[in-house]
Amino acid sequence: MARRLTPEQERITRTLDRPLFVAAGAGSGKSSTLAERVAWALTPGSGEGGAPYLDSLDEVLVITFTHAAADEIKEKIRARLREGGMAGHALEVDSAWISTIHGMCSRILRRHALALGLDPGFKVAGEGVSAGLVERAVDEVCGIVQDDPAYAELRRSFELRGRAGIDGAATVFGMLRTLRDAAGSALEGFDSVEFPGTAPDVFGELSLYLDCVQRALALGQEAKAFSSKAGEAERTNLQNSLEVVGRLLSLPPSQRDAAHAAEAFGRIRKPGDAYRSKKMRELGAQIKAAYADCALAVQMAGAMRFRTQLVQLAREVDRRYAGLKAGLGVLDNDDLLSLTLRAFREHPEVAAEYGRRFRLVMVDEFQDTNAQQVRMIELLSGPGACHLCTVGDAQQSIYRFRAADVQVFRDRQASLPPSSVVELKNNFRSHDDVLRFVAHVLGRGQEGGGGLLPRFMDLVAWEGRASGFAARGLPRVSVELVCSRRQGRAQVSSQDRARVMADRVAERLASYIDAGQRPSDVALLLGRMSRLGSYLEALRSRGIECVVSGGSTFSQSEEVRLVSALLHLLANPRDTQDGLYPVLTSQMFCLSADDLLLLATRDQEEVDALTKRGIDAGLVSFDLPAGLEPSPALRSARELVVRAFRRLGSWPVRDVLAAMLRESGLVARLE
């Protein structure tokens, strides 16, 4: 059964014999188009001489970013094949090469495990487990830095962990973790990783900061934000930043060195909070973020002289991490990629086998890949990657924290001729009013036609989409702005603001319902459940009955109660009722009554008999009655709690909590 396709979808479906680059906007039907492409390739007439282009689904490789996306496209391909009368091929879907890139690598490695020196039954660690092992390895190496005189200068220049905790890139801990992560996704590992903190990095961040300062000075003058004493001080600070950074950026390239920038940046004071208007507060937040980025770039530039030491330490982190994984008998996702790429290099016959096998290679969410992944996929896509079709949207690139590089997406587009580039701009989900609103905010919302997203892809609503909008005469998109002002000397309370906002929203919803929209088609999303009462009162006073879904029982869930108990424990180790006891008996440790009894018992000094004590004292001292050994669970719980208290001096509480949850194995068990 033929389906109606747009001209662009038709072009993608029928182009099988050369590379393709597809820029597909949200809701443009890209998954359905990929399914159509597979179905067409198996249809008589798609190949030479009236034959199908493909003999079977075994010649198709589809890479998706998530397991859910892989399952979705499998079902679409299966359904399309059945519709087209190809039930035999539909039976091949479950065994087809349609998976995440890690799933593909795992499948290849298991098939060739013996030749590659691997255990065919290897296990893959979840992200929670691997993150905990990395933190443990970095923590151990930081212990070396702390004790070894060879790193005295490094310790004087950078905090070991510092207030920034495990997420602080400008601490030794953060730099080591960043370097190890970068090496894990680099083509040549540590040999090809780019060390951050070069002069172009610093001056690039300074240029962005200068732009923010210039806009703040202009807007602040217009909004009279500098009329107060605090505002005048902030204006002076920004003017000083403008002069210092302006002089730096006016230097010729040959004189732009990181040391000079660091010295000048030290003369700039951190931006303050002297703004009252909403626009200025938003811009103030941008200035602070830009200042923080500059500070980080300057700090990292200062680390350049320690590059050799830091890379050596990062290699040691990687070695220890590998040892921890070997102890558990697991690989992680980076191992799957690096081992597969190494297998292709060291065993070219393996890469050649798959390069000959796959005649249709498609990669979905291509914007979330990195150079290492792309190189591997190219090796599977025939000579010159002639069978490769990549599909993605740069506007949806959200996985840079996982080493995804949107520049890879853009480089791929630039490398192909225009005849191999297709844009899917038809949106099948949303009405044109919604798309115009999005385009105004993201594409043309700033002066000069800029917008929040560079190179914004403006989508066009599909004319054949059925409309479920019943409130005729009212706009489909409505923006309600609520402002609060001082009443004399008193500031409007947050409760009053919430009540006014709830009334305005309820009034607007009531107008849509009165105009014909069904109440069951209305969903109200709240940022904070603490204001729920105000919204319920406002809605019900207008006769709009509603059901609360989610949020109301969040604090009663077992996991949240555990985190609450952990906070009590870290705040006061002697709080056994709300802290220690609930933690030790929770799913985190699952200690038995015997374990707790052991903690609550000690030998007497004067008499040869046992006496009781608090379990907090038993856990801290761990001097257990003679002849009694702690269980492995009790010993592990004690080590983890003691380690958490040691970290409290330099880590933020949230990072200590996260580490406890990961290192206890709870996150892995929940996954």
Image (cartoon, rainbow, N blue to C red):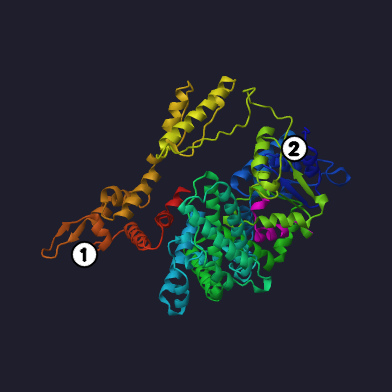
Q: Does the magenta-highlighted stretch encompass residue 371?
A: yes
Disc 2 residue crowd, few under 14, some 14–19, many 20+, Cα 10 Å? some
| Percent coordinates x, y for residue 243 in the rendering | 59, 64
| Residue 533 visible here | yes
Circle 1 residue: 626
Q: Earlier in the sequence, mark 2 or mark 1?
A: 2
Residue 224 highlighted magenta (yes or no): no
The N terminus, quarter of image: top right
Q: How many marks?
A: 2
The answer to whether residue 446 is above or below residue 166 is: above
Q: Quick one: which residue is furthest to the bottom in this view?
A: 150
In the image, taking residue 411 as reference, residue 174 lies left or right, namely left
**How much space separates mark 2 and mark 1, taking CA atoms?**
74 Å
Secondary structure that dominates the magenta span = helix
User: SS of the residue at dot 1?
Assistant: loop
Residue 92 in percent (x, y) is at 69, 43
The local crowd at label 1, few if under 14, some if 14 to 19, many if 20 or more residues have their Cα within 10 Å, is few
Tell me the kind of residue under disc 2: Met
The span shown in magenta is: 364-383
- Give how far across and how far down residue 381 sits, in percent: 74, 56
Mark number displayed over residue 86: 2
Residue 147, by quadrant, is bottom left
